[in-house]
Amino acid sequence: MKCLRACIVLLLLVPSATALAGSGDVKVIALFSNKALLQVGEQQKVVSAGETFAGVLLQSATGRGAVVVIDGETMNLGLNQSIAGNFKKPDRSRLRIVPDARGMYFVKGTINDKSTSFLVDTGATHVTMSGNKARALKIDFKEGSRGMAQTAAALVPVWQIELNSVSIGGIKLRNVSATVIDGDKPSSVLLGNSFLRHTDMQQANSVLIIRKRY
């Protein structure tokens, strides 16, 4: 605990090596379990999950990153990553996703109006999930079309189904094709092209921007 407190004090006293571009920028300086040291403009504070600091809500925090909500827009921030300030009212059909430390794009959303998280995967043909995840989401996937697929370990049963709805941010699509693989893999729900083909995606530096295609 002494080391943790000392580290926090040190971070509060020593300016970041990479100065913030604007007075309203939001940056994650340090990460802890359910807490994060946030910098908003020139202010810094250790914030607990569920707490709001300078208009920024810390939704959750782990060693991998923090999820913050700014003006109703949910954003993922890794260590020492920042988002420019001067926030405008968010466009609900547009979502910004910051990569984690491994360069992966995770985003929270819903399937059939039940909360889950996704890994954006342009290499996946459909929204893809494990049988265990489908059961947790109360999806009766065995009513779908059954087939077989080769995994790294063995041939496993798969089912092709249609989800009532899939949403991330303010982007919500209905009747989305999905694949369910029996077992516990993949560990994350893959947000594949049955959803992504209805959006426009671009990268601004490392940030992935997804907009609904009208």
Image (cartoon, rainbow, N blue to C red):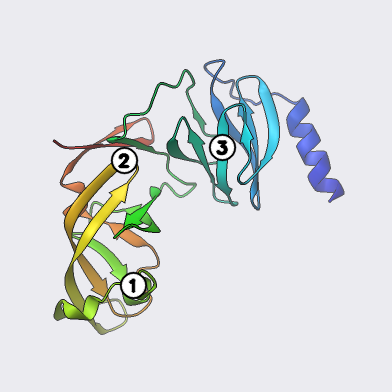
Front-most of residues 85 and 9: 85
Say whether residue 150 is visible. no
Label 3 packing within 10 angstroms: few (<14), some (14-19), many (20+)? many
The reply to whether dot 3 and dot 1 touch (C-beta < 8 Å) is no
CA gap, disc 3 to disc 1? 30 Å
Q: Residue at x 40, y 58 (%)?
A: 115
Indicate left or right for 3 with 92 as reference: right
Residue that extends furthest to the front in the rendered view of this protein: 113
Dot 2 falls on a residue whose secondary structure is loop
Instruction: Identify the residue position indicated by label 1 in the image.
Output: 138
What residue is pinned by disc 2? 170
Q: Position of 115 compared to 145: left or right?
A: right
Give the residue at mark 3: 57
* Residue positioned 75% across, 29% down in the render: 12
Residue 48 coordinates in the image, percent (x, y): 67, 44
Q: Earlier in the sequence, mark 3 or mark 1?
A: 3
Q: Residues within 10 Å of mark 1 (few under 14, many from 20)?
A: few
The residue shown at (56%, 37%) is 57
Left/right of residue 158 with respect to residue 188 in the rendered view:
left
**Lower position in the chain sequence, tag 2 or tag 3:** 3
Name the kind of residue labelled 1 in the image.
Lys
Say what amino acid the circle numbered 2 marks: Gly
